Image (cartoon, helix red, strand yellow):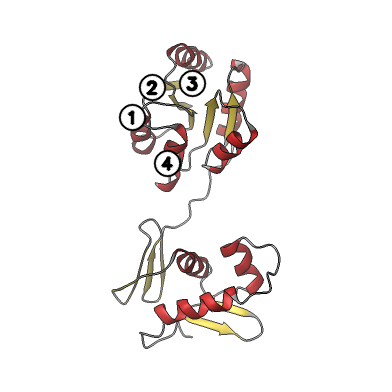
Amino acid sequence: MRILLIEDDTKIGEFVSRGLREAGHVCDMLSDGQDGLFHAIRETYDVYVIDRMLPGLDGLSIVRSMRAAGVKTPALFLSAIAGIDDRVEGLEAGADDYLVKPFAFSELLARVNALARRPPAISEKTLLQVADLTMDVMKRRVTRAGVEIELQPREFTLLEVLARNEGRVLTRTMLLERVWDFHFDPKTSVVETHISRLRGKIDKPFDVPLLHTIRNTGYSLHAPR
């Protein structure tokens, strides 16, 4: 297993890297956050072990940038910051595990091995197309028939959910959960309002409608049948 360790504390870094090598793994160690991000994106590893506090670029920023670049490799944070809110922040940034310093190497090794055993994440497509409508999720760019369309963040998310479910009917409840993270009915017309705005941008300027209202059911994005 190939592991990237990003740790600026020399003693901890050497201790961890030596232990990982003795356990039969290949371990590359870096001490600067910028260098770490460069290697994390450009090289192939099985697991990342990242300190939260680093020179150049902190661990949270490294993981967020990795995830934004589409890197799905499991990442474990090492940190002396032990508060619950800090751990939650680390996991929400995209890390898969969080280990507080000081730690037993046996626990670190067990966690690294557990992360490596996880089935690989299924990569979502970043380029979506429905008829002549194209979405580049990474670049946050939408075009139809070669014409660029400006969308607000929530409109973009709504269109992405519809595009990833091309041809399927999504109910109002499903859209509330996936776009607004509402697990209850807020009794507002937020879905209808955003659908209307989205339709005005991706359909009305063009000859063929793609966004369809399915009466008493929901909405669907697809080319005319």
**CA gap, disc 2 to disc 4?**
17 Å
Label 1 SS: helix
Marks 1 and 2 sit apart, C-alpha to C-alpha, by: 8 Å
Image coordinates for residue 56, horizontal then vertical, percent: 35, 29
Q: Amino acid at mark 2?
A: Ser
Q: Position of residue 54 (x, y in %)?
A: 42, 26
The three-letter code of the residue at mark 1 reads Asp
* Residue bearing the label numbered 4: 66
The residue tagged 3 is: 25
Q: Amino acid at mark 3?
A: His
Residue 145 as seen in the image, left or right of residue 185 = left
Q: How many marks?
A: 4
The structure residue drawn at horizontal position 50% and vertical position 81%, both measured from the top left corner, is 196
* Secondary element at tag 3: loop
Residue matched to label 1: 35
Contact between labelled residues 2 and 1, with CB atoms less than 8 Å apart = yes
Cα separation between marks 2 and 3: 19 Å
